[in-house]
Image: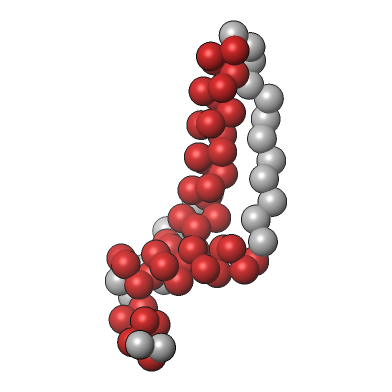
Amino acid sequence: MSRRLEPAEVPIYTAIELPKALDTADALGEAGLAGRKAAPTNIALSDLKIAFATTILRCEGRPDRESRHIGRARG
């Protein structure tokens, strides 16, 4: 059973899943051009990369009220 994400959870989920999806799309494209079947891709994301991407997404998208203060506090 799936559950709905809270607005503050959406950028975190996106920051984790988007690089995986892009990596998979690249692997599928390369395999298709080479005429072979794509192998499953497993990328490991560091917590720092996830936190950085989440911060950017929250600042740009403003999905929650706390995101408005992230960039202003540091100028």
Q: On the picture, is 43 further left or further right than 62?
A: right
Which residue is farthest bottom? 73
Total numbered labels: 0
Q: Work out whether 24 lies above or below 3.
A: above
Residue at the location (69% across, 51% down)? Answer: 44
Q: Work out whether 34 lies above or below 57.
A: above
- The quadrant where residue 60 appears: bottom left
Q: Using the rendered image of the protein, determine whether residue 56 is visible from the camera's viewpoint.
A: yes
Which residue is farthest front? 75
Residue at the location (35% across, 87% down)? Answer: 75
Name the colour scheme: secondary structure
Residue at the location (56% across, 44% down)? Answer: 20
Rendering coords of residue 29 (x, y %): 51, 23
Rendering coords of residue 62 (x, y %): 30, 71
Work out whether residue 23 or residue 8 is closer to the camera in this orientation and state it.
23
Q: Work out whether 42 lies above or below 12.
A: above
Q: Using the rendered image of the protein, determine whether residue 63 is visible from the camera's viewpoint.
A: no
Q: On the picture, is 68 further left or further right than 20?
A: left
- The quadrant where residue 72 appears: bottom left
- The quadrant where residue 37 appears: top right
Rendering coords of residue 18 (x, y %): 49, 48
Rendering coords of residue 13 (x, y %): 49, 58
